[in-house]
Amino acid sequence: MYKILQKQFLNPTVCKMVIDAPLIAKKAQPGQFVILRALEDSERIPLTISDYDKEKGTVTIIFQLVGESTSELSALCEGDEICDFAGPLGKPSNLDGLKKVVVVGGGVGCAIAYPVAKKLKENGCCVHSVIGFRNKDLVILKDEFEAASERLAVMTDDGSFGEKGLVTEALEALIEEGNQYDEVIAIGPLVMMKFVCKVTEKYGIKTTVSMNPVMVDGTGMCGGCRLTVDGKTQFACVDGPDFDGHKVDFDEAISRSSMYREFENRRREAFCNLMKKEAE
Amino acid sequence: MANMNPNKCPMPSQDPMVRNRNFSEVALGYTLEMAMEEAQRCLGCKHKPCIEGCPVLIDIPAFIAEVAKGDIKKAYEILSQQTSLPAVCGRVCPQETQCEGKCVRAIKGESVAIGRLERFVADWYRENCAEKPQPAKPNGKKVAVIGAGPTGLTCAGELAKKGYGVTVYEALHTAGGVLVYGIPEFRLPKDIVKYEIDNLKAMGVKIETNMVIGKILTIDELFEMGYGAVYIGSGAGLPKFMGIPGESLKGVYSANEYLTRVNLMKAYLPTSKTPIRKSHNVAVVGGGNVAMDAARSAKRLGAENVYIVYRRGMQELPARLEEIEHAQEEGIIFKLLTNPVEIIGDENGEVKAVKCVEMMLGEPDSSGRRRPVVKPDSEFVIDIDTMIMSIGTSPNPLISSTTEGLETDKWGCIVTNGDDGLTTRNAVYAGGDAVTGAATVILAMGAGKQAAAAIDKMLSGK
């Protein structure tokens, strides 16, 4: 069992937990993920490792409440234990030798983009960050990004915080200013990553994306997380989760990500109703 | 005087049209009377050909003789000397090509029902004897086993019997490997697997779940932790796909994913939090046991039409005979000499049909099986909403890619010296699907047993 040492809501639908998992913390690197089951009868879900402390033996996860599984997880309290927590899975992000990079984070994807920005800064890389959210209430990790970046642009869809607009607009502005980037690292919703790649393709800047498809085991057995990259089938759990964004078939990934949407919505509603009843 | 009935005592089973709507076990098992009657069909041959057919060398005539006498406890003890998973083997071994295939009674009539008797003995013992195995006297040496599937559990059990301190590292949240994620409840109830694993724990075997070796710990680190030897039984790996258009459509599964959702995650229960598609028309591509399991699971989940699409003929189906017969009885439709060439999707990216071609059998290929060739102008379309690919797997790279000096062949299978499973790394042994590619539970168990003997020999300096 894996104890929850700290729990905090970063915004109404995004929750951060620090988990006691010393063996995983010892091995974790940016870009890797864990598979967890909140309770004994829960679904297995993959979550990217958002931070880790090798000395304290802790792993931090940040997740958005999207379905029943994440709602169940968020209902656990400090001191409670997570039933299963396996990792660190996937290949670490390859950040070696990068001198100047734009890190683009979208929504809860910022939770994964942040450790990348932090690691790059530690490596002595010049980091420019662009983070985007739907509105002011959903902004997370702004101070952390500020500390890790030489420049930071915060974008909101409605202009309620930072600049009004999409992350792609801020990214393009940075490039147009004449900044020469070795790489763009984009982590966020599939649609955002797709359009970031469209922008960078135009300028010929290498772009790495972090894919988070449907997974069951997460260890290279089920094949549910397959993607088409450069015309070939790749498995996000063992070949990724980072891929060359210009080679990923995003339209296919977007279509596949909706495979269980109806089931998820139904289960989430049932879970919310249950919680409401319990509260009454 | 032996019972000279040329036929096996029939196995009581659930009615096919009832069972194809539930996940309870298909075969109900012999009664004591049936078992004793069947046991009397064994001639007790002096040369015991059946034992040669058994990968774990069970003394088959000896245990059957005890069943014939009605001493089931004694029969169980004889079984336990050679197998740590008798209730499993009695259910899932391909007996017709192993022990029963060598049975003298099969020359005229049917072989002795060795598998059914093994199952009976294991079930009887579980239901009637509360005794748990006792731990052996510790010999002070430690062995790490990677993977709690059939090969790892067998190796662990054999070593524990000899007093080794064994820890099994399992990547998933439950021990059992393919016995829990792959083989469905209706063929192998999970309570039985749990019972056999609890027995291993009673013998002192430690099982650590959620431990993905190669990631959380490397093999080198296991040695640093004081293990004298490591046995790799990490199993088959990533599913293969055909490489035809449409395999990324919504509704295309690998059999591994489909069965893992159904079995490990219990998606067949209405309370399950793991989703599975509600299908009406399902095509399963492949002809092995896994394909049969996937097809029969889909039928039980409510599909009206379930097709087995296989490019060769009935004779060439690699599945166990019993699974094929059960599938046919349950209404699975066999589209043999048929090969898919394209999966067709609708405007939402959902599977709506599969385009196939008819095949003919040509000259035998290198495997000795006649090679299927496409019949010209034979394209046709089957309407489906779900497609399950069951055409094999390629080995998992997590361990081989993180262990220096561990050689793999061109398919990614771990190279061993043959019988005792020693790899190209000192004190590292391997067996089961990680070495052979996808095979059977019993072959994996046989490999685990042989490796345990080799590990014992090495560590005890014999």
Image (spheres, coloured by chain):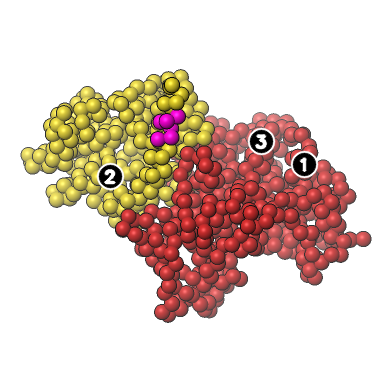
* Residue under disc 3 on the same chain as residue under disc 2: no
**Residue B333 lies within the magenta run:** no
Q: Is residue B8 left or right of residue A57?
A: right
**Residue A272 lies within the magenta run:** yes
Give the number of the disc on residue B125.
1
Q: Residue at image x 61%, y 33%?
A: B206
The residue singled out by tag 3 in the image is B198
Question: Nearest the camera: A249 or A56?
Answer: A249
Give the number of the disc on residue A190.
2
* Residue under disc 2 on the same chain as residue under disc 1: no
Secondary structure state at the residue bearing disc 1: helix
Instruction: Mark yes or no: residue B88 visible.
Output: yes
Secondary structure state at the residue bearing disc 2: helix
Q: Are marks 2 and 1 in contact (CB under 8 Å)?
A: no
At label 2, which amino acid type do we have?
Answer: Leu
| Shade of chain A as shown in the rendered figure | yellow
Alpha-carbon neighbours of circle 1 within 10 Å: few (<14), some, or many (≥20)?
A: some
Q: Is residue A216 above or below residue B372?
A: above
Q: Is residue A6 left or right of residue B115?
A: left
| Shade of chain B as shown in the rendered figure | red
Give the number of the disc on residue B362.
none
Parent chain of label 2: A
Residue range corresponding to the magenta coloring: A269-274
Q: Report the quarter where the N terminus of chain B lies.
A: bottom right
